[in-house]
Amino acid sequence: MPVSALTENLKNNNGNVDQKDGVTSPSQDIPISGGQSLTREVSRSMHARESFSFGTSPDQQRHRPTFSRPSHESGSPHLTRTMTGAAPKKLQPFREQDVKILLLENVNKTGQDVLREQGYQVEALKSSLPEDQLIERIKDVHVLGIRSKTKLNSRVLAAAKNLIVIGCFCIGTNQVDLKYAADHGICVFNSPFSNSRSVAELVIAEIITLARQLGDRSNEMHAGTWNKVSSKCWEVRGKTLGIVGYGHIGSQLSVMTEAMGMKVIYYDVVNLMSLGTAHQVSSLDELLKGADFITLHVPEIPETKNMISTAQFEVMKTGSYLINASRGSVVDIPALIEASRNGKIAGAALDVYPSEPAGNGDYFNNELNSWCEDLRRLKNIILTPHIGGSTEEAQSAIGIEVAESLVRYVNEGVTVGAVNMPEVTLRSLTMDQEDHARVIFIHQNVPGVLGRVNKVLSDHNVDKQMSDSRGDMAYMMADISNVRQAEIETLYKDLEGLKERIITRILY
Ligand SMILES: NC(=O)c1ccc[n+]([C@@H]2O[C@H](COP(=O)([O-])OP(=O)(O)OC[C@H]3O[C@@H](n4cnc5c(N)ncnc54)[C@H](O)[C@@H]3O)[C@@H](O)[C@H]2O)c1
């Protein structure tokens, strides 16, 4: 089992301390007896027994707030503020140049910038890597950034001896063996909601496009046909939009479509406060009966599979429209084809499909889904290749959100937003808390561990402590005071000695 993320190798003090007032200084080595000092580096190797491990952020540069984006972009106000208004003490576990980050698949520049601003060593590649090359490349990285094409199975992860955190710069995390990662103390982050606005805007475009049959008119013109018609073309003002799933995307749409003069009703399994004058209805059927346009924004779960099928099309108003930019399994497509052919619906827009090709090309045919060619022949059906969230803005927001999660995790141990670990956070330490340290102990979730951990911490004042578990593993974070630098080695070794330990990190 991989162990600690951070080690401090004992080595001769070569004059690495250079604390100048208010100016940049390199990492401060920790003096130990015998004229030696500790140089920070990263290791998860259990065999590095002659070294001991912890993290630190003693230098002035790292204490300086580095995030200056507008708050709506940064989304991480706690990186720059503390509850008391005191300057935050930026904890970093390693010398900045020691944190090795590998980014694959052309991670957005916004994300790369956030990581580089921290002084980490960032290597960014444009593509993913074949498994054997990946194994070779990630052997010594501490942070790995990927998108959807890089598969991180247990074989690959086992090779990454120093890895403490993975950032998926995308929505899904299916490409990562999350359980293996959690069991080995590797935290995984993603960005599930950075593209909500992009999806909502696509749906707005589709509502008007369907109401005015714009897709068909445009196709006709491209084929050289002038077909000026007004029959069955509508304004959207005064029409009713039915939103199924009033979450991040559904609620954005609610506000935007009301501004266009639409009446909004929504159905959600949870009772949610309406925005504007929208009205929550008590059943899906009630929504289907009352809406002129129905748009689906539910997750892919067993309850939503074929949520709209023959029975639901029968309930819908004749001449209504259906939009699905959620997940492909939510609509029974053969039933939709039938409802379109028999005139029950006047049009539909689909962005997602039960099977989708892995890459771009002429794959949207019956080999992919048996009904693709029938679907392509229907009138007033907009078909898009899962582009709801594909905008420059969404990619940029994903870059920032995931990179900031990685920074918070590396520097402060905060797991909020993690997909495979319990969410644990503590307020940032401040600059006036000089003799404080943050202890992070990722461990097996078995009885008695916390008692043993607190025994190790008992010589210090535990100011704050938070612990939570998820399945077989648990995450404990404690801020302790009255810690002299020389005591950190003992603390670290004692925690490492507990048999339930997965990873120990100490930041100060
Ligand atoms: N097309 C794209 O490119 C794209 C991009 C982003 C998200 N998505 C998809 O859009 C969907 C919605 O995303 P979101 O960010 O708004 O999700 P969200 O989690 O914020 O909201 C989902 C809402 O659906 C509700 N819900 C769950 N089960 C339901 C049910 N059986 N009936 C009614 N309501 C139910 C939930 O209570 C929640 O309010 C997801 O499936 C997501 O994968 C697609």
Image (tube, rainbow, N blue to C red):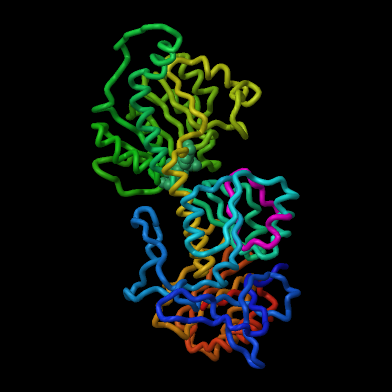
Is 435 drawn above or below residue 410 in the view shown?
below
Question: Residue 35: x, y in percent?
Answer: 64, 91
Stretch of the chain drawn in magenta: 136-154
Q: Quadrant of ligand 1?
A: top left
Residue lying farthest to the bottom in this orientation: 34
Question: Residue 67: x, y in percent?
Answer: 40, 62
Look at the image and say whether residue 135 sits in the magenta stretch: no
Front position in the image: 128 or 455: 128
For the N terminus, give its image quadrant.
Answer: bottom right
- Whether residue 503 appears in this view of the structure is no
Question: Residue 395: x, y in percent?
Answer: 47, 44
Question: Residue 352: x, y in percent?
Answer: 51, 32
Task: Give left or right: position of 197 versus 91.
Answer: left
Residue for point 60% across, 86% down: 456
Front position in the image: 66 or 165: 66
Report which quarter residue 84 is drawn in. bottom left
Task: Give left or right: position of 293 versus 17.
Answer: left
- Whether residue 190 appears in this view of the structure is yes
Residue for point 68% across, 57% down: 138
Front position in the image: 280 or 438: 438
